[in-house]
Image: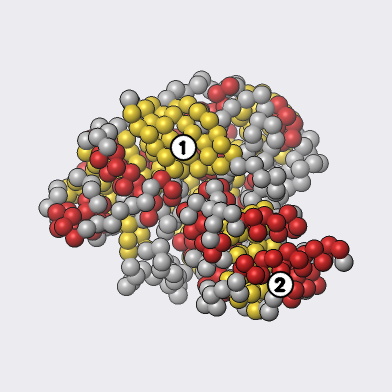
């Protein structure tokens, strides 16, 4: 049987998280279908069809899919799910909202945030904030799975030539309405998929001081993140949060500034390739996962770092 | 309007858990157990709705072993009116919990169920959505703000790119994210009072729910440790190392 992936998109662009899910699906089988449910989302369907490894794209285009409301997406997905052995989605906030609803209506267990595929029915997933890896086996007839994107490389966005077919939308479900969205625009790479990330914690002291991180982020082409403490203190918006309950990321370079390293923060970044920590507390737990660390006052170290990066660029 | 709040007893957020040597389970002997932090937030939100005159009664539910009664008492000490324990020693997976809660909702007829968005032990993030599905109710997950009035709730949700606001008709399921509120502490007089609040005990059998686990845990392991790092003197040394040793910039 084929594998179905629920595409993550904004009706214009297929989000790269979908490409990570395609790689996970390729470990399960060769016939990989992508469901694009949206409103005027033909462009997304085209992009999905060109992803290497995808064999078929099914497009349900209707106004009531425009905002990815869980009630409507679920009604559509449960209709097509019986054609598949697995239904996968990248573990974004959209899919985390929708997939358990799908699983419950199919009366099957969901397997959340897998980081490895052992076989068609056995998966590895982190529990306890990533301090334990659980290998779980599912005997369900349909495996509903969300995929931690950082654990799987992105499939090539080009090279595929999948069939695109229209899928009859399910009737609109009442009871839930989209009101509005306030998205954070920074002009920098998206935190979830950035190759380099610099994050600030409570030690940053204020919202204004995050400008010190913005400056270095711009020089490195990095995204800016934050610890839960910094978000709770109101220094930056919630979507900056890296951690167990925020975003889980694994960039090539992660720089933690003024972050002590609570368990729940480490859960969100400890799989980064190179970790740098800057903290004035010699005992900060963040140093235990860091490849390089500086014990010092971040208000001195950051301007120095900025100047060193300038030298590098000139040099 | 009645509000139902499910709460889970979990290993405390500050405990670093260890896997037993045979990889069969996490060692929770002599480990501090507490209410799941997200559930503290959902209890607080329900209590605030009651204080605002929107809710008339806050009922807390926990599914699990007898010791979960402590968690229910904690919730009652911060303002919940009564508790229900679904008593079982079986390892409960999210779908089973959702089915137990569905059976209780059918009995209790609340207009709103507020849950934590995820439990910090299994990190599944499933029960609220599954419960909404089984009830055929709308859902508003990852809430950072809730305004409930006139048979509707306007809920601001934390999403990957920022915030989103949805409106749901009641009855509905809401799951709480971190910034929904700051839970209060229980005061000693309220802890004493909570001991006298009603606490019913039911069983999965009595609710007619099969809680047999669907997923088999094959093994548990601790992730590989990172290699020890190096303390560097200053920004100049850091940049040199990042450029020449690990080629990260």
Query: Which residue is identified by label 2?
Result: B235
| Secondary-structure class at tag 2 | helix
Q: Chain of mark 1?
A: B
Same subunit: marks 2 and 1: yes
Q: Position of residue A117 (x, y in %)?
A: 60, 55
The mark closer to the camera, 2 or 1, is: 2
Report the front residue among A198 and B5. A198
**Quadrant location of residue B13?**
bottom left
Q: Residue at x 46, y 37 (%)?
A: B156
Query: Does residue A310 appear to the left or right of B190 in the view shown?
Result: right
- Which numbered marker is on residue A191? none
Residue in view at x 61 percent, y 56 percent: A210
Decide if residue B23 is on the left or right side of residue B103: right
Label 2 – label 1 distance at C-alpha: 41 Å
Q: Tell me, yes or no, if residue B111 can be seen here.
A: yes
Query: The N terminus of chain B is located in which quarter?
Result: top left
Q: Position of residue B183 (x, y in %)?
A: 33, 52
Front residue of B192 and B213: B192
Q: Quadrant of residue B161 in the image?
A: top right
- Mark closer to the chain start, 2 or 1: 1
Say how the picture is coloured: secondary structure
Query: Quarter holding the C terminus of chain B?
Result: bottom right
At 80% from the left edge and 41% from the top edge, which residue is drawn?
Answer: A158
Q: Residue at x 55, y 78 (%)?
A: A282
How crowded pointer 2 is (Cα within 10 Å; few <14, some 14-19, many 20+) is rated as many
Relative height, residue A187 to residue A245 (above, below): above
Disc 1 packing (10 Å; few <14; some 14–19; many ≥20)? many
The chain under label 2 reads: B
Residue A164 is drawn in which quadrant?
top right
* Rendering coords of residue A8 (x, y %): 62, 38
Taking A287 as reference, is A254 above or below it? Answer: above
Q: Which residue is mark 1?
A: B156
């Amino acid at each position: 049987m084929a594998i179905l992936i629920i595409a993550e998109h904004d009706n214009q662009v297929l989000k790269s998280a979908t490409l990570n899910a395609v790689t996970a699906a390729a470990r399960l089988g060769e016939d990989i279908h992508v469901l694009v449910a949206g409103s005027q989302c033909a462009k997304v369907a085209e992009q999905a069809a060109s992803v290497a490894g995808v064999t078929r794209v099914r497009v349900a285009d209707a106004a009531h899919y425009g905002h990815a409301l869980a009630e409507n997406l679920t009604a559509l997905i449960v209709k097509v799910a019986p054609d598949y052995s697995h239904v996968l989605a990248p573990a974004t906030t959209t899919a985390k909202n929708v997939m358990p609803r799908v699983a419950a209506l199919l009366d099957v267990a969901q397997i959340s945030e897998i980081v490895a595929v052992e076989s068609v029915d056995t998966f590895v997933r982190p529990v306890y904030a990533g301090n334990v890896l659980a290998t779980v086996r599912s005997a369900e007839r349909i495996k509903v799975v969300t995929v931690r994107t950082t654990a799987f490389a992105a499939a090539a966005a080009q090279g595929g030539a999948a069939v695109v077919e229209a899928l009859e939308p399910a009737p609109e479900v009442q009871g839930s309405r989209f009101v509005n969205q306030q998205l954070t625009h920074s002009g920098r790479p998206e935190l979830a998929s950035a190759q380099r990330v610099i994050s600030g914690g409570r030690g940053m002291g204020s919202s204004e001081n995050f400008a010190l991180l913005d400056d270095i982020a711009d020089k490195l082409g990095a995204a800016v993140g934050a610890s839960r403490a910094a978000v709770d203190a109101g220094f930056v918006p919630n979507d900056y949060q890296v951690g167990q309950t925020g975003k889980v990321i694994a960039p090539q370079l992660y720089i933690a500034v003024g972050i002590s390293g609570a368990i729940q923060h480490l859960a969100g970044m400890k799989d980064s390739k190179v970790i740098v920590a800057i903290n004035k507390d010699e005992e900060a737990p963040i140093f235990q996962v860091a490849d390089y660390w500086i014990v010092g006052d971040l208000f001195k170290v950051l301007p120095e770092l900025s100047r060193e990066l300038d030298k590098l660029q000139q040099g | 309007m009645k509000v139902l709040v499910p709460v889970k007893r979990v290993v405390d957020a500050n405990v670093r858990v260890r896997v037993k040597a045979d990889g069969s389970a996490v060692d929770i002997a002599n480990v501090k157990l507490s209410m799941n932090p997200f559930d503290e937030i959902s209890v607080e939100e329900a209590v605030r709705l009651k204080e605002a005159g929107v809710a008339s009664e806050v009922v807390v539910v926990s599914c699990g072993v007898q010791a979960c009664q402590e968690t229910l008492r904690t919730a009652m000490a911060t303002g919940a009116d009564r508790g229900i324990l679904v008593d079982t020693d079986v390892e409960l997976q999210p779908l089973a919990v959702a089915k137990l809660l569905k059976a209780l909702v059918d009995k209790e007829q609340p207009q709103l169920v507020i849950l934590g968005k995820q439990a910090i032990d299994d990190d599944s993030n499933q029960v609220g959505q599954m419960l909404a599905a089984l009830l055929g109710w709308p859902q508003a997950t990852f809430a950072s703000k809730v305004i409930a009035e006139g048979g509707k709730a306007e809920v601001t949700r934390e999403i990957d790119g920022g915030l989103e606001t949805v409106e749901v008709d009641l009855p509905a399921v809401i799951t709480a994210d971190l910034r929904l509120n700051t839970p209060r502490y229980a005061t000693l007089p309220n802890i004493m009072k909570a001991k006298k609040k009603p606490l019913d005990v039911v069983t999965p059998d009595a609710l007619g729910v099969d809680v047999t686990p669907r997923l088999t845990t094959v093994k548990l392991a601790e992730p590989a440790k990172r290699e020890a790092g190096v303390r560097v003197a200053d920004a100049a040394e850091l940049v040199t190392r990042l450029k020449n040793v690990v080629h990260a910039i």
